[in-house]
Amino acid sequence: MPERERHGNVRSVLVESDRQLIRRPEEGDRRGLERVFCDPVMMRYLGSAWTSDKVAEALQEWHDDWGVDNRWYGALLRKDTLEAIGAAGVMENTIPGEPGLELSWFVLPEHQRQGFATEITHELLHFAFDGLGAERVVAETHPENPASNRVLEKLRFQCLGERRHSYDYLPGFDTQVLWELTRGSWRQGTSWASRPSER
């Protein structure tokens, strides 16, 4: 997929699945993003909840950086209602010492356990490998976050074990489990990965 559509405009919708899409974040998404990032339960594995001001700052950054240097992070919407149900995307070279596109996602509690995370991350992998030509996709989870770990296992990521480093924007998220999926592994599992909901 090209980064830019006709007339030089940056694409506003990053990926679509049967039930969801990720699009460039706008000011109107602020309330939905606050539900994600200002909620102590949602952020329990990442150190602490953000303030409203921090969400506003991140939203502006994600909007302005959309598509720049392979930074694609946006609002996650249900296609049937266009309701914001979380956030997701990929960004390049964001994990210290680990080259590749980092995959991450958040799904609000009332929409969890319905396969949304696996469905949209599968589409992000298509975008990363087939659209951007990535050689490696990485992800980090908290050791005590079994739901996220299961999503990555289902998509055939390899667990590389625990690491320790700090992020200024995620104070308290000091221990991570590192995962990777290489281009070769993605190609080998393409027929399986084409129908993640059936596994």
Image (spheres, grey):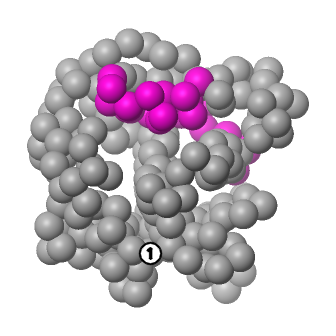
> How far across and how far down the image is residue 163, in percent?
27, 18
Q: Mark 1: few, some, or many residues within 10 Å (few <14, many ≥20)?
A: many
Picture quarter with the C terminus: top right
In this view, 48 is above or below 86: above
Instruction: Determine if residue 61 is in view.
Output: no
Residue lying farthest to the top in this orientation: 161
In this view, 190 is above or below 31: above
> How far across and how far down the image is residue 193, in percent?
77, 34
Instruction: Determine if residue 163 is in view.
Output: yes
Camera-nearest residue between 35 and 129: 35
> How far across and how far down the image is residue 153, in percent?
59, 24
SS at circle 1:
loop
Question: From which residue to which does the magenta span run?
Answer: 129-153
Residue 78 occupies which quadrant of the picture? Answer: bottom right
Q: Amino acid at mark 1?
A: Pro
The residue drawn where x is 50% and y is 73% is 84
The residue drawn where x is 83% and y is 29% is 192
> How far across and how far down the image is residue 129, in percent?
67, 40
In this view, 59 is above or below 178: below
The residue drawn where x is 44% and y is 75% is 25
Left or right of 107: which side holds 18?
right
Quickly name the residue at label 1.
Answer: 25
Picture quarter with the N terminus: bottom right
Left or right of 99: which side holds 13?
right
The residue drawn where x is 55% and y is 17% is 158
